Amino acid sequence: MKRLRRAGSIVSLLVVTGALSLGSTAQAQDEKTSFVIGTTGGLPTVNPFKGLTSETYYVLSLQYDLLINFAKDDLSAAPGLATEWTSSEDGLTWTIKIREGVTWHDGTPFTAEDVEFTYNTILENETGSFIDYFPNVDSIEAVDDTTIVWTATEPTIAPVIPPWVYILPKHIWEPLGDYQDMRQFPNFPDTVGTGPFQLTEYERGEHWTLTANPDYWAGAPNIDEIVVRKFNNQEAMVTALRTGEIDYLSGITVDLFESLEGVEGITTHVGPATGFDQMTFNMCNPATTSAKYCENNPGTGHEALRDPVVRQAISMVIDRDQLVERVFQGFAQPGTTMVPPFAAQWHAEPASDTQVYDPAAAAQLLDDAGYVDTDNDGVRETPDGEPLRFRFFLRSESDENQLSGEFIASWLEDLGIATNITVGSTDDLTELWYEHDYDMYIWGWFPDPDPDFILSTFTSGSCGVWSDTCYSNPEYDALYDQQQIATSVEERQAIIDEMQQIVYDDVPEVVLYYNNWLEAYRSDRWEGLVQSPEPQGYLIGQFTAYSELSLRPVGTGGPGTTTTTGGDTGIPAWVWIGVIGGVVVLVTVVTLVRRGRSEEDLA
């Protein structure tokens, strides 16, 4: 998925259906079997080319299919719309067989041409939200209705990472015209996909409903629809779960989560720490290699934040251990790099101490660099006399976000740095992010099951597309390109380790913590939810929709009725192709990261 950019909560990962009169039984709605989810977020768009939030990506994940899925147990590559794939010995050509008998929601047959159209639209328009899935592509061609041939200019495993790109119906999207027209397409009510559910009701920012697809190629869901109610705050949403107005929620505070433990009829679940929250600095700077974008969109960021000394000092006064204990009560771990430790294959702990908690050393750094309080008002000034007073945006949908921000503001005050805090919605922050009209903010990511995407967000070319910061470092950019064409896992691993260290030392953002995903549902009414990945995965909002297919009312089925999508029969996703002496070396690797954010590109 894409960064579920920036997820706020699965509470925000799930859809909304406001304005529904549910009574005391959420699943008995007009005689339909309805699974009702609570959220505090909205659904700003259902256009795949403008996806930004987790709400959008949850809808997309049920509306559309991927070419290759993520296996339920270990997130390895598994059959999706593709049933099998093979690589040439030199790793340059992949032949992918397409599933037969699949139809779009409107009854039109699905063919390899739909895959060709979707992928080539991204390639031809260099869409920033997806282009990094297609490194060194020479061509992607449908040679017949059931075969795609992907040809690269360098040996690649890109097809089986796999690309987190939802396949679109050519007959709906091609007549829209050029890419900009596609980006303006509301995609409702003409929301046609091949997925297990179809969006059938949608009021932007208010409520929406997904209706089950009875002809789904992997078997029809066991429920009629997924609906979600929007709540103004988490407390009201938790009350609704207790009273039975909703069936599921997630992403709530630890206090609220613990208040549900042991409640009759409710099961709580501690999910994985696959994502992270980060404090971002506005670094849009026309003097860097991001100049082309920043010259036209310079933003309003405080120039002092372009100085790595200032950023390092800020990081060194943030007590991550205290955030973990006081904000999450232990349901998290201190943050270091942008590749979460959940992705054990790729995560590297920093070799330096440039961000280690040390307030005295932080103060000395600023003193030595000339950032001192010359007028004794408690706020340091730059050598040019500008106060270190930063605008600090915190998201209203996240209590943890706000509490963390309050702690950080207090620590910065002790350092002689002032903050003007604004609390607003994710939509508000999105607009500020587009305009680079901020100094600092706290947001979060749920990266892909491969680090390539989250690594790409720090490249110079990602400025104005996916980058939080408009960070630019030519050395890092070169390493990013190298890891895409590495010919062994070990070689790629070493490059990715170095990339993490560079970003850690340059401090374009501060990774605050990796927090667990907290979920709760009405187990007195629902069964069949499965955990993915194992041993500690999600119940809802997974990389592939396993629970939404196997979910059923209590007492209506057993283990033998659980629907799957072929996830346990796939070829491992981390099958690295390296050409050594003309022999193809296949190495199976499992990486566990969740993409989170999906962001709209601004091209």
Image (spheres, helix red, strand yellow):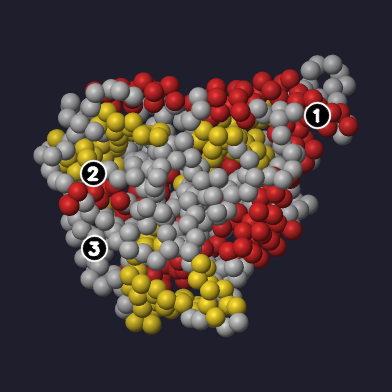
On the image, the x and y values in percent for residue 322 come to: 60, 25
* Residue found at x 25% / y 51%: 549
On the image, the x and y values in percent for residue 48 come to: 42, 55
Q: Nearer the viewer, residue 455 or 90?
A: 90
Q: Nearer the viewer, residue 372 or 424?
A: 372
* Residue found at x 72% / y 21%: 413
- In terms of secondary structure, where does tag 3 sit? loop
* Residue 225 image label: none
Residue indicated by mark 1: 361
> Please, what is the three-letter code of the amino acid marked with disc 3?
Trp
On the image, the x and y values in percent for residue 12 come to: 40, 38
> Please, what is the three-letter code of the amino acid marked with disc 2?
Gly
Residue indicated by mark 2: 528
How far is disc 3 from disc 1 in space, using C-alphas?
Answer: 60 Å
Label 3 neighbourhood size at 10 Å, few (<14), some (14-19), many (20+)? some
Residue indicated by mark 3: 217
Using the rendered view, name the quadrant where residue 403 is placed.
Answer: top right
How far is disc 2 from disc 1 in space, using C-alphas?
Answer: 53 Å
